[in-house]
Image (cartoon, rainbow, N blue to C red):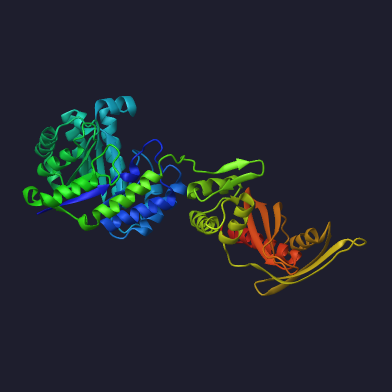
Amino acid sequence: MKQIRISDVTMKQAAEGFNLSFKEKIELSKLLDRLGVDLIELEGISNPRIDGLRIKSIAAAVGSSAIAVPVQLNSDVSAVWNALQTAKHPRLQVCAPVSPVQMEYLFHKKPEAMLSAIENTISACKAVCPDVEFIADDATRSEPAFLSKALQTAISAGATTVTLCDTAGTMLPTEFAAFIQAQYITVPALETVTLGISCVNTLSMADACAIAAISAGAGHIKAATYPLGSANLANIARLISAKGDALDAECGIHTTQLSRIVEQIAWMCQSGKGKPVSQSTTEDNSGIYLSEHDDIAAISRTVEKLGYDLSEEDIAKVYDAFRQIVQKKERVSTKELDAIIASAAMQVPATYQLDTYVVTSGNTISATAHIKLTKNGQAMEGVCMGDGSIDAAFMAIEKITGCHYELDDFQLQAVTEGREAMGQTVVKLRAGGKVYSGRGISTDIVGAGIRAYLSALNKIVYEEAAE
């Protein structure tokens, strides 16, 4: 009995007013994996940092299902592969239009140029990933001779799956089955790969066309658990389960869990309708505020606006810490986000450690700070006068280290109440066009400030050494 591979395209669907958050996409992927979907198709990469983190997070959350990400024609495959390579079962997809109208009017390519782009891109993908899929977009409206050349080119370049798309959705089931059979005749090499299909539901025939394609030899079906103009995954799975003997086919979808998981996914997708793509970040006279509706993309944009240049790993840490805080309060300000970044991001070994500090000040004397630090076990000390205790302490640290960095911001707030309240200080230093923040907590305001300054300083020193 032939094993039919089912891939879910829910997250690749684009519809006005339909948006899933970062967290919802991970949860959706887990549900699809539990359902037994063979392949989970994700959107491509437009923002390397945000989209790369999204793909890596989903890849880490999924155990059995393969993860597929598209690569644009004639583009550098490294950005996509760097994000996808951690998946247990990665697949790279190359989608190319094969109909005259799409090639010339939408992509401005002549047939020979399109064949060259297909060959080059698939070859580049095959060099890093053993599983490569070629998607022939608008295949049912292509010139038969060119389609045959495109399919042969893709297979020769290393494609292991070739998918034919009825992008217009105007074929009847019998017509689509005949179309599939014709390809096997004109391109014998299709017998050596998996033939996939994708149908648009323009005539409400997508499910029927998919089943007809299985009868004609297709082994891979694209569908959606929350269909928006595509084949319905639940319907396809039930049809294969009910008519498997007649089709001589079976699939790996767990039909016992199908209804419950599809309902969960439908609720998740429907709750995303009406949410703006930019999420709920609002701005008033006091600054930018973030709420529980903001996803990792909104957090990343806000972090960039604040001047930070964080890695994908640090963005993930900041987002996790943000989610913990936003569950306890309605809004998080940028000042609070600074504190989150200072405590969660770029935690590095301490090059400079505080040993002792003595600060004297008064209304008749200038503030003086005497600070002792250790660096690699070696004691270092400095004494400076300044315009206030904090200024004197920071200048003493600069004297010890021999480095001056622009003080971008200094924040102080109480984290406990009473006469012995703990004070939290956030210091932001700017170096090389980047912002580094440090956080310090102490019952002594000056002590908290010194610790915060050293925390930010150690991050700068660590990154400069790494470079």
- Nearest the viewer among 36 and 464 is 36
**Picture coordinates of residue 154, whole percent (x, y):** 23, 41
Residue placed at 50% from the left, 58% from the top?
320
Q: Which image quadrant for residue 179?
A: top left
Horizontal and vertical percent for residue 60? 37, 59
Q: Residue furthest bottom?
A: 377
Residue 446 appears at what percent x and percent y? Answer: 76, 64
Determine the image quadrant of residue 208: top left
State the residue lying farthest toward the left. Answer: 246
Q: Residue at x 8, y 50 (%)?
A: 248
Identity of the residue drawn at 46% across and 48% down: 50
**Residue in view at x 37 percent, y 44 percent:** 270
The quadrant in which residue 398 appears is bottom right
Which quarter shows the C terminus? Answer: bottom right
Name above or below for residue 120 compared with residue 106.
Answer: below
- Answer with left or right where residue 60 lies relative to residue 191: right
Looking at the image, residue 376 sits to the left or right of residue 141; the answer is: right
- Residue 77 visible somewhere in the drawing: no
Residue 362 coordinates in the image, percent (x, y) = 89, 63
Relative to residue 188, is residue 277 drawn left or right?
right
| Quadrant into which the N terminus falls | bottom left
